[in-house]
Amino acid sequence: MKWLKKGLIFDPTKHKLANNCLEFAQSPQTLLFDNFVRIYFSTRQKDVATGKYLSHISFVDFDKDFKKVLNISTDTVIELGQLGCFDEHGIFPINIVRHANKILAYTCGWSRRVAVSVETSTGLAFSEDNGVTFKKVGAGPVLTSSAHEPMLVGDSFVKVYDDCFHMWYIFGQRWIEPDNNEPAARVYKIAHAISIDGVNWQKEEGKQIIADSLNEDECQALPTVIKIENRYHMYFCFREAMDFRKNVKRGYRLGYAWSDDLRSWTRDDEAAGICFSEKGWDSEMMCYPHIFECNGHVYLLYNGNEFGRYGFGLAQLEQVEMK
């Protein structure tokens, strides 16, 4: 894969966002219209009572050249969960799927825990106003922890191939005990599930589909998949489990894998065709990728330094060489 970077295209600190959110435009994901592209992202509102953040969904509309901002959401796109629900403390990310004249949203809901920082599950919502707002199908998740995936189910990305819904998502394998220098750290991997209706899912229970590159504690996140010719291409991000927030060498970077059958995946990060810039907004971190087609081109959205604090950028695919 060979990519041409287009640079940072949206900086949330330069715009007024709904819900009094400041900074962060994480996990950009698209919904295409005839004359524009809507890009959803997660941003943050500071909870005055606790000093912690709540993650909210917003969107920005671009022209199809990604050079002009046409509109930014000013109202709540999807409500957070009620007291005690799986998405009480945030939604991050949201994946939008247009299928059979419906606009669906698969959400990653966050809720805080006492012994560890967070638990996540995947919810489902739908839109009746062309993606301006979404209503949940219920208060609970459609994909959550189970016997062999005991925690941290989320980051779901859905595509429909041959009338079958395919979901790539992450699940937590374990938490690493805290020590004097680090809080409890989570370890999560990428998995796969299928569905005939997009609501009821069949997991390949506890099966990690992308091999580790760093070590067994590698954290893998935000899978995104596209089919080019007869091959499926996946981008994702990965990092060390600990000391990753400020240590550039241990933070998120982009990974790549390919498959010819949607079942077995060959990891080949060296073939990703995109890496850190020498300086600037994506020189220390690259994370939360989203791959999509628009006007005959393939694009990659992704976040840069500090987990997308200052927005997201764009790259355009120039070349694919099949092995």
Image (tube, rainbow, N blue to C red):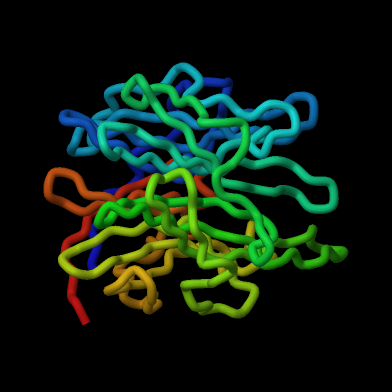
Question: In which quadrant will I find the C terminus?
Answer: bottom left
* Outermost residue, top side: 75
- Closer to the camera in the image, 311 or 169: 169
Q: Report whether 147 appears left or right of 307.
A: right
Is any atom of residue 306 visible in this view? no
Residue 83 placement (x, y as % from top left): 74, 28
* Outermost residue, left side: 296
* Outermost residue, right side: 180
Mark count = 0
Task: Identify whether 185 is placed above or below 51.
Answer: below
Figure quadrant of residue 206: bottom right
Question: In which quadrant will I find the N terminus?
Answer: bottom left
Task: Identify whether 240 is placed above or below 123.
Answer: below
Residue 269 placement (x, y as % from top left): 39, 75
Is any atom of residue 150 visible in this view? yes
- Closer to the camera in the image, 222 or 72: 222
Figure quadrant of residue 261: bottom left
Residue that appears at 79% across and 58% down:
183
Residue 39 placement (x, y as % from top left): 35, 36
Q: Report whether 216 appears left or right of 117.
A: left
Q: Report whether 95 appears left or right of 108.
A: left
Residue that appears at 53% across and 34% down:
43
Residue 198 placement (x, y as % from top left): 41, 45
Residue that appears at 51% across and 21% down:
76
Q: Report whether 163 appears left or right of 145.
A: left
* Outermost residue, bottom side: 323
Figure quadrant of residue 176: bottom right
Residue that appears at 69% across and 60% down:
150
